[in-house]
Image (cartoon, rainbow, N blue to C red):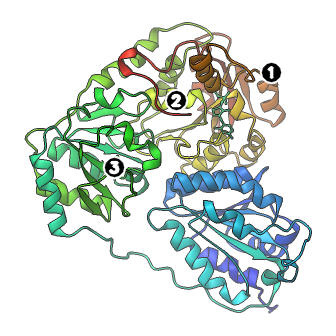
Amino acid sequence: MSQRTASDVFVHCLEAEGVRYVFGIPGEETLDLNRSLAEGAVEFVPVRHEQGAAYMADMYGRLTGSPGVCLGTLGPGACNLVTGLADAFLDHAPVVALTGQGDLGRMHKESHQYIDLVSMMRPITKWNARLNSPAMIPEAVRKAFKVAQSQKPGPTHLELPEDVMEAPLDAEPLPVKTGQRRPEPSGAEIEEAARLIQDADRPVVLAGNGVLRVGAAYAGREFSHVTGIPVAETFMGKGVLDYQDDNALGTVGLQSRDYALAGFDDAALVITVGYDLVEHAPVNWNPDRDKRIVCVDTAPVEIDEYYMTDSDLIGDIELTLNRLAETCGSVVETGGSGRLNEIVLGHFEAARDDDRFPMTPPRALWDIRQALGPRDILVSDVGLHKLWITRMFPAHEPNTVMIANGLAGMGFALPSAIAAKLVCPDRHVVTVNGDGGFLMNSQELETAMRLKTAIVNVIWEDRQFGSIVWKQEKKFNRHFGVDFTNPDFVRLAEAYGLPAWRCESVDAFPEHLRHALTLDVPSLIVLPIDYSLDVALSEELGQETVAT
Ligand SMILES: Cc1ncc(C[n+]2csc(CCOP(=O)(O)OP(=O)(O)O)c2C)c(N)n1
């Protein structure tokens, strides 16, 4: 038997971690690793730009809870991973990034494509290391996965010098422990929080990304139903409650009065559940710092002068919510107002009869909602369309409206959707993109076609960076530096082998969409969009408070 190399052991460690895919682009400095991957059980998925690989790993991590893995070579390959890893860092997606590197012997001097990747990755990873010797591999891989997955999750990075990976090594992976005890707050902490909640005037829940991340949405529903306390959701918390649930207050955060109209002004206490401060700063819902706050989360809370908590219930969110519901029982004076939902869903429902063309965003979202089932997935790119989606697109189930929020990088949707389809082959996956962001990673149409990931890509075409136009018009009454022309997107998609259509009438969109959803290959729909309707829907909702 030929001698095993460090790269063989490395891949064996990935297999032990349960890795299914490595998304990436190989390089001359990852030859041994790619050879070992080719001979092992993990599928290497070649992509067309490393940013796409990082976003695929990010979405894989979001939807499975297990780290997605991406690979770039040294220097330029690693640099291209950065945007996707920064996204995973700010939105807390578990990812393990692997990068090639030159030999250990040339790192102290100027040399071809050498950049100190460990330093470069430091601010956007939870942990990050160079493999200085083959013997480190079992420990380093186990640590990279454990840290990426532990709360709150995020990316880790391993830099793999070429000479380390080709060296002989005979070693086994460290055991991967599962079924460990889930930490919980103490009984006394639960009781104190329950007392605060029972004594408070008109409490409400603010549910965030963390609830979905740990699969605790159903515990959130149960908590709301047992206690009677209604739930407002952040953009990334969509689907904690079905939007048709009587206790659903809607998605808050786009405009300043969202919170007031969901009942926050009258609430003396807010229970934040799985809320990451990066989602929307607490100054927006607690501007006078007068609310009592019960925090249910997986990790100690961040400090913010507008978020000084009265009770921290740190541990497993599902267990905590179950115990808190049991201890609180039915709460007498619950808060919340249905006004926000009335306004937003009122516009949404009315859109069904809006036959203007180019289409208005609410009508487009109405058609998408009708075409998708409750568990199907909508992935938004970044731009004005994202604000419309977060404002208005109603979710039935958790993890069905996926967005890039913390970093909010354009180009997120297409590669992420490919991974969503790999993870959820039985669910429809639709992307909505601006014509600006779509071209940032459109090369991944080739990856989608090759993998036969049957995602439907909808481009809202306005030949402008729409959200910047919107902001410039509000600030200066004019816009500049935001107009462009587009390629013929239909012919572009066809060049990759995808079926594609341009909508020429309002009825064409639902027709094309429904047809596209029956196909077993990816497809593309160009939808001329009319952004003249303000996403800041009404004065009653106040000024917008977020950036795209
Ligand atoms: C990678 C990246 N570059 C720049 C921005 C800043 N930015 C946010 S939205 C936006 C315009 C988006 O335009 P488009 O993709 O056409 O979508 P639309 O707003 O028209 O829906 C820009 C430039 C960003 N978020 N990400």
Q: Residue 21 versus residue 532: which sits nearer the camera?
A: 532
Residue position for label 3: 307
Q: Gap between marks 1 and 3, in whole Å?
A: 45 Å
Q: Quadrant of ligand 1?
A: top right
User: In x, y percent, where is residue 60?
Assistant: 57, 55
User: Disc 2 and disc 1: Cα gap in Å?
Assistant: 23 Å
Q: Residue 394 location in percent, x, y?
A: 41, 30
The residue at 81%/87% (across/down) is 167
Q: Amino acid at mark 2?
A: Leu
Q: Would residue 488 be found to the left or right of residue 20 on screen? A: right
Callout 2: helix, strand or loop? helix
Mark 1, residue position: 485
Task: Pinpoint residue 291: horizontal percent, then vertical percent.
Answer: 24, 43
Quadrant hosting residue 497: top right
The amino acid type, in three-letter code, at marker 3 is Tyr
Whether 73 is drawn above or below 9: the answer is above
Q: Earlier in the sequence, mark 2 or mark 3?
A: 3
Q: Residue at x 11, y 54 (%)?
A: 195
Q: Secondary structure at mark 1?
A: loop
Question: Which residue is rendered at x = 47% and y = 21% of the image?
Answer: 366
Residue drawn at (79%, 90%) of the image: 168
Viewer-nearest residue: 455 or 117:
117
Foreground residue, 431 or 523?
431
Quarter holding the C terminus is top right
Between residue 234 and residue 270, name the one nearer to us: 270
Per the rendering, the mark at residue 387 is 2
